[in-house]
Image: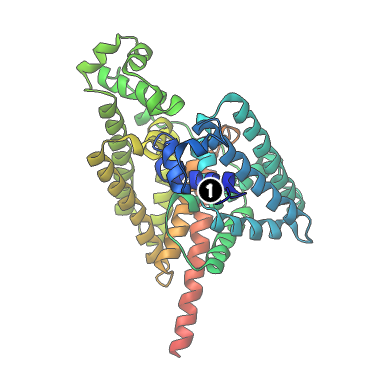
């Protein structure tokens, strides 16, 4: 009889991390984890109490690995440079860790949530201190903003499957993160809400239910919200919700299409009115930041609950998401024609993830000029990628000569 591998728990952790990234917490069972690791379901329980315990171990061990890499980088002569290089390598090697940290932590019990928040705060403190050492005079709040944004660049690789040769991938991520860390945070105030954005009349019951449902889905997760919960939050009996929606799935689908329509309408408007490709790209970024910041519940459902959408609508919403990303990629490559398509996609996902993450980060969302700041940070990433494309263009012209 063969002996049990000494690293079985690590194998189970790695298998679970990838499954959670692909399918979400509720889309993965203990038996799925066991099968991916080549063992039976009961074998998982020799190491973990259950699926929630697996997730907690995945996140905490990932943070420990991130922390070890951070400590090693901080011991070097140029700690900020070393941090960027080290985390770039870690992000390429373990793409799944950052996605789980962002999307799945709400499924943990309170004790594990506290552990993760505490460890994450320690790591963020290291980044902020190192950045302020490298940029004396940078205000603490601005250093936090730039540090969070740079980590979003690294974390963005977990949200797509685009790849490059390892060293080239690490180098690109490092350059994009450095563009963020070098950024100047503009002094700005919160813009006044335009009159056309202020509701002028009471919303319909259907609209009210959709608003309530998306808020509950965001706060508790789709599977932990019932039609009775939605009705109670809207001040009506649960069965009355069925007069407007056939069930939870229809509410979820409606939220997804609502967000998709907002994004595509905004994109068509700014692209049609821009005088140059770079202006169109800048305005597209601004449109995205504005829409996401005003649609936080809808966006969380659109981005985080697709696994619960019925198959036909899920495929269509994925197609819509990809088409929207393609608009960004096309514009970026119009600005920088010699930027390879995979690198353009990686840069676009990095810019999008900065916005997606920071509009849901409590310490950041209270900043009065956040829309302007996020637009600038996302454009810093895209402009850095465009500059690399221009370098390729210059090399191509030299080769022609």
Would you place residue 152 above or below residue 50 in this image? below
Q: Residue furthest bottom?
A: 401
Query: Going by the image, does 43 lie left or right of 312?
Result: right
Q: Label 1: which residue?
A: 14
From the top left corner, tell me how far across and down residue 107 is, in percent: 50, 30
Q: Identify the image quadrant of residue 84.
A: bottom right
Q: Identify the image quadrant of residue 336.
A: bottom left
**Could one spot residue 309 in this view of the protein?**
yes
From the top left corner, tell me how far across and down residue 183 is, in percent: 61, 53
Would you place residue 62 above or below residue 169 in this image? above
Would you place residue 341 above or below residue 148 in this image? below
From the top left corner, tell me how far across and down residue 398 is, in percent: 48, 86
Considering depth in this image, is 392 or 68 the residue closer to the camera? 68
Residue at (56%, 57%) from the top-left corner?
93
Q: Residue furthest front?
A: 1
Considering depth in this image, is 286 or 79 the residue closer to the camera? 79
- Mark 1: few, some, or many residues within 10 Å (few <14, many ≥20)? some
Residue at (71%, 39%) from the top-left corner?
122
Dot 1: element: helix
* Screen quadrant of the C terminus: bottom left
Would you place residue 344 above or below residue 113 in this image? below
Residue at (60%, 58%) from the top-left corner?
88
From the top left corner, tell me how far across and down residue 71 is, in percent: 74, 51
Colouring:
rainbow
Q: How many marks?
A: 1
**Could one spot residue 145 in this view of the protein?**
no
Residue at (55%, 32%) from the top-left corner?
53
Considering depth in this image, is 75 or 36 the residue closer to the camera? 36
């Amino acid at each position: 009889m063969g002996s049990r591998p000494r690293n079985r728990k690590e194998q189970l952790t790695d298998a679970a991390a990838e499954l959670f990234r692909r399918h979400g917490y509720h889309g993965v069972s203990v038996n799925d984890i066991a099968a991916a690791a080549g063992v039976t379901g009961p074998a998982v329980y020799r190491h973990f109490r259950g699926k929630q315990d697996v997730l907690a171990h995945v996140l905490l061990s990932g943070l420990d690995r991130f922390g070890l890499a951070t400590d090693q980088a901080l011991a070097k002569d140029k700690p900020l440079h070393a941090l960027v290089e080290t985390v770039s390598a870690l992000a390429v090697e373990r793409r799944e860790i950052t996605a789980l940290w962002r999307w799945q932590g709400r499924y943990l019990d309170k004790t594990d949530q506290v552990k993760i928040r505490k460890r994450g705060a320690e790591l963020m403190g290291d980044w902020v201190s190192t950045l302020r050492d490298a940029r004396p005079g940078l205000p603490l709040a601005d250093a936090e903003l730039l540090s969070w944004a740079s980590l979003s660049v690294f974390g963005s690789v977990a949200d797509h499957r685009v790849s490059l040769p390892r060293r080239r991938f690490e180098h690109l991520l490092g350059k994009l993160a450095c563009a963020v860390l070098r950024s100047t945070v503009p002094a700005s105030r919160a813009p006044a809400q335009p009159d056309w954005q202020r509701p002028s009349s009471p919303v319909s019951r259907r609209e009210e239910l959709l608003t309530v449902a998306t808020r509950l889905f965001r706060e508790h997760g789709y599977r932990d919200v019932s039609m009775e919960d939605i009705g109670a939050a809207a001040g009506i009996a649960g069965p009355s919700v069925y007069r407007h929606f056939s069930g939870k799935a229809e509410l979820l689908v409606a939220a997804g299409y609502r967000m998709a329509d907002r994004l595509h309408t905004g994109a068509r408007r700014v692209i049609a009115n821009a005088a140059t490709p770079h202006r169109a790209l800048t305005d597209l970024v601004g449109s995205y930041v504005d829409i996401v910041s005003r649609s936080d519940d809808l966006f969380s459902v659109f981005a985080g609950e697709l696994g619960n959408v019925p198959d036909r609508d899920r495929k269509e919403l994925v197609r819509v998401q990809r088409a929207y990303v393609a608009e960004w990629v096309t514009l970026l490559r119009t600005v920088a024609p010699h930027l390879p398509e995979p690198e353009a996609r990686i840069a676009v996902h990095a810019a999008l993830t900065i916005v997606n993450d920071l509009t849901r980060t409590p310490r950041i969302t209270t900043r009065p000029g956040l829309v302007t700041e996020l637009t600038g940070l996302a454009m810093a990433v895209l402009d850095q990628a465009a500059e690399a494309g221009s370098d390729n263009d210059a090399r191509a012209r030299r080769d022609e000569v």
